[in-house]
Image (spheres, rainbow, N blue to C red):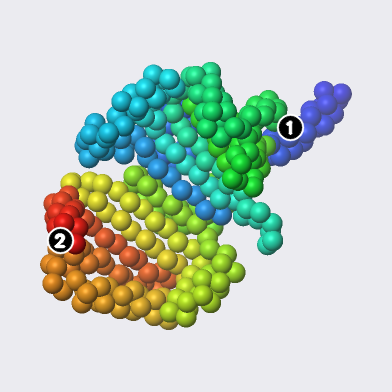
Amino acid sequence: MKKGLVLALIVPLLVFSLSSCKKKEAVPVAGEAKPADMLNLFPQESQAVFFANLEKLMKLEAVNQAIQKDENYQKYQEFIQQVGIDPQKDVFYACGAILSAPEGEKQNAAAVINLKYDKEKVLGFIKAQATQEEGVEIQEEDYNGVTLYTGQPKDEKEPGCFAFLDDSNIIVGTKVGVQGVIDVAQGKKPSCKTSENLTNLLGDVNQEALFWGVGFFPAKTMDQAAGQNPMLANLKTIKAGTISFDYANQAYAGEIKLFSDDEQKVKQLADFINGLKSMGAMATAQKPVFGELLNNIQITPEPDKVIISVQITEDLIQRLEAESKKETEEK
């Protein structure tokens, strides 16, 4: 009888405690994490999210050649020795978010760099650079067991903030933004993956691309943009957007999607962009290579969005560079 009474009291308590616990997302480990894992670190109130696959970028032959040929290559090597980080081997991802804020209040933001690093070397380098170049003294404070480092450059109103979340992730941003990432990583706040609207938007972007971003546009911001230029009146109905940029098969591909609830305005916006494209074609009629570039830009209206896409081959880029160089020499 007593045993049954004890169980009757304990079981509901266990169920309640389990149901009330926030799910703690896995923190991305450098060299093991997938791009989507970076979203585990950003708060539910994220208004926009941006991602760069730095590992993939650094493996591009064009990037490798640019690094090798750069006049500051020796300084690049010295940086590797001082900080202990080789950008081509040790850096994997960078992901950032802009957090929504009540009207009239300052927006906060944070970014996380996923990499392999030596905390003491990195911290020593940052402190030395801050003192020598900016005359800034780095301040330290504890936040839930994580040290926050802040410093305020002379030409900035708000102090910058950074923190070493763990052995794989460094956070930078506003103080509130950095604290928000720490809260999510420690399971004290839900991640942006729990935002239904943001999750739906993420489904419309290629998360395997070199770079991508998604975000919602505040109505006030779009109204201001449209008010400054009557030609941009159709922007007032744009609610959200996505962008991606990638490289495959010796070609670069970019895509922008602008979302609206007004199908008629979507069509008008597509017509406006096509009009700009036609004007550009007329202006470059005597330069076929620029006309070829414009022909590669496609504008596609759908009931809820406008899709702007472009694909540029390496061959076309080389010819564009040659034409631009020729124009410069002729001036």
Mark 2 or mark 1: which comes first in sequence?
Answer: 1
Of residue 133 and residue 266, the one placed in the foreground of this image is 133
In the image, residue 136 sits, relative to residue 214, either above or below, namely above
Q: Nearer the viewer, mark 2 or mark 1?
A: 2
How much space separates mark 2 and mark 1, taking CA atoms? Answer: 79 Å
Q: Residue 66 in the image: x percent, y percent?
A: 25, 37
User: What residue is shown at x 61% (from left), y 32% (from top)?
Assistant: 136
User: What residue is shown at x 42% (from left), y 58% (from top)?
Assistant: 242
Marking on residue 14: 1
Quadrant of the image for the C terminus? bottom left
Q: Is residue 165 visible?
A: no
Query: How many neighbours does mark 2 have within 10 angstroms: few (below 14), some (14-19), or many (20 or more)?
Result: few
Q: Residue 202 in the image: x percent, y percent?
A: 45, 53
In the image, residue 173 sits, relative to residue 268, either above or below, namely above
Quadrant of the image for the N terminus? top right
Circles 2, 1 touching at the beta carbon (< 8 Å): no
Tag 2's secondary structure? helix
Q: Residue 235 in the image: x percent, y percent?
A: 47, 73
User: What residue is shown at x 22% (from left), y 74% (from top)?
Assistant: 283
Q: Which residue is mark 2?
A: 330
